[in-house]
């Protein structure tokens, strides 16, 4: 296990989050939510950390309890009620670590008795630490935010998409296996399409076809361009072999599928998928459309309807598809 790479910048105080945001008014649901979040966070102790950050983990755990939070440290720090004293911490509080409010390093979830759960990449696995006894935690602890109540204003499609993403995130780091079929052999390894099939079935009860081509040709709505994508959509990509073997517009160029995890304001798109190199991971289609995923992207398909149910199957023609270059 890698040792924690300590930042060699001294803190000018232990609590520096004051002034980030004014807090929300407390609600009666905070205590029960905090306990649920704390219990949920402990379920993932010792899970392997792959291509996700500490804020992703906090956002993921809260999503399991029906609360949408940003998955970036800066945006996460703007949520909730400011907690200034360690003795005021309660279960579910979101802890922040860094050298100043403008230089955040990591975040974790307080679970009580001085302990918290954190998914900090240098540790390689999600771990439990103690704010009272860990010198690293004490040195870089800045403060906390308390998240109040459950968000009930989210659109129905977004609620379903969150459930799908949450389920998919549980399998981060699971190895890739071509031809894996959980229905037949009970394998908890995945190739790209068995991953999407399993996640949608488990989280939403949707029955997708088994292969990426079949999922595009038979499941969900019409073909989507990149600019039309939203969280929870399926996204399809070509592979080097398929690109060279089939002409533009031939549906057989489709050789890989993933799930849109997030469409960011800058135009980049996070994709949750099972990939030969890394297994289940999160990768990004960059905003400038220059990286591998952006260049190999073909089209998307919407399997979550606006009302949160499974979109009506629309069979696509096998010829004449228009690919986005």
Image (cartoon, rainbow, N blue to C red):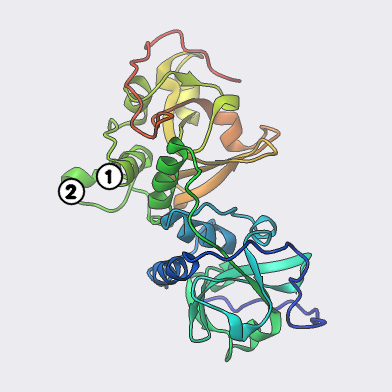
> Which one is nearer the viewer's eye here, 308 or 292?
308
Of 24 and 271, the residue lying toward us:
24
Do callouts 2 and 1 mark residues in contact (Cβ within 8 Å)?
A: yes
Q: In the image, is residue 304 above or below residue 175?
A: above
Q: Report whether residue 179 is seen.
A: yes
The image shows residue 184, relative to residue 290, as above or below, that is below
Residue 106, given in percent of the width and then of the height, sits at: 64, 68
Label 1: element kind: loop
Q: Position of residue 320 (x, y in %)?
A: 45, 8
Q: Residue 3: which quarter of the image?
A: bottom right
Q: Say whether residue 111 is left or right of residue 54.
A: left
Identify the residue position indicated by label 1 in the image. Answer: 180
Identify the residue at image location x=67%, y=62%: 77
> Residue placed farthest to the right in the image?
12
Image quadrant in which you'd find residue 304? top left
Residue 185's disc number: 2
Left or right, residue 151 beside residue 20: left
- Quarter of the figure that contains the C terminus: top right
Label 1: few (<14), some or many (≥20) within 10 Å? some
Tag 2, which secondary structure?
helix
> Which residue is pictured at 44% across the width and 14% down the height?
250
Q: Residue at point 37% right, 14% down?
A: 316
Identify the mark nearer the N-term, 2 or 1: 1
- In space, the residues marked 2 and 1 are separated at their CA atoms by 8 Å
């Amino acid at each position: 296990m890698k040792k924690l790479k300590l930042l060699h910048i001294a803190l000018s105080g232990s609590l520096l989050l004051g002034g980030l945001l004014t807090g929300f008014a407390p609600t009666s649901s905070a205590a029960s939510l905090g306990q649920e979040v704390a219990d949920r966070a402990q379920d993932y102790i010792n899970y392997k950390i792959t291509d996700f950050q500490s804020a992703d983990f906090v956002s993921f755990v809260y999503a399991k309890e029906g609360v949408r939070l940003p998955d970036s440290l800066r945006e996460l720090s703007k949520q909730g009620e400011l907690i200034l004293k360690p003795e005021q911490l309660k279960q579910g509080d979101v802890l922040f670590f860094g050298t100043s409010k403008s230089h955040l390093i990591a975040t974790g979830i307080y679970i009580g008795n001085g302990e918290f759960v954190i998914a900090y990449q240098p540790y390689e696995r999600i771990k439990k630490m103690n704010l009272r006894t860990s010198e690293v935690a004490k040195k870089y602890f800045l403060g906390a935010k308390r998240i109040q109540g459950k968000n009930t204003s989210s659109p129905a499609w977004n609620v379903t998409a969150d459930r799908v993403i949450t389920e998919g995130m549980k399998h981060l780091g699971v190895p890739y296996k071509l031809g894996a079929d959980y229905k037949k052999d009970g394998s908890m390894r995945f190739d790209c399409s068995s991953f999407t099939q399993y996640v949608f079935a488990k989280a939403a009860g949707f029955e997708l076809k088994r292969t990426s081509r079949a999922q595009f040709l038979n499941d969900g709505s019409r073909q989507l361009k990149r600019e039309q994508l939203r969280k929870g959509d399926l996204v399809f990509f070509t592979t080097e072999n398929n690109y060279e073997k089939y002409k533009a517009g031939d549906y057989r160029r489709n050789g890989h599928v993933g799930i849109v995890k997030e469409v960011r304001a800058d135009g980049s798109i996070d994709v949750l998928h099972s990939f030969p190199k890394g297994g289940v991971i999160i990768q990004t289609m960059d905003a400038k459309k220059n990286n591998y995923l952006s260049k190999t992207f073909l089209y998307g398909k919407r399997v979550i309807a606006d009302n949160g149910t499974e979109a009506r199957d629309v069979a696509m023609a096998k010829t004449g598809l228009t690919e986005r270059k």
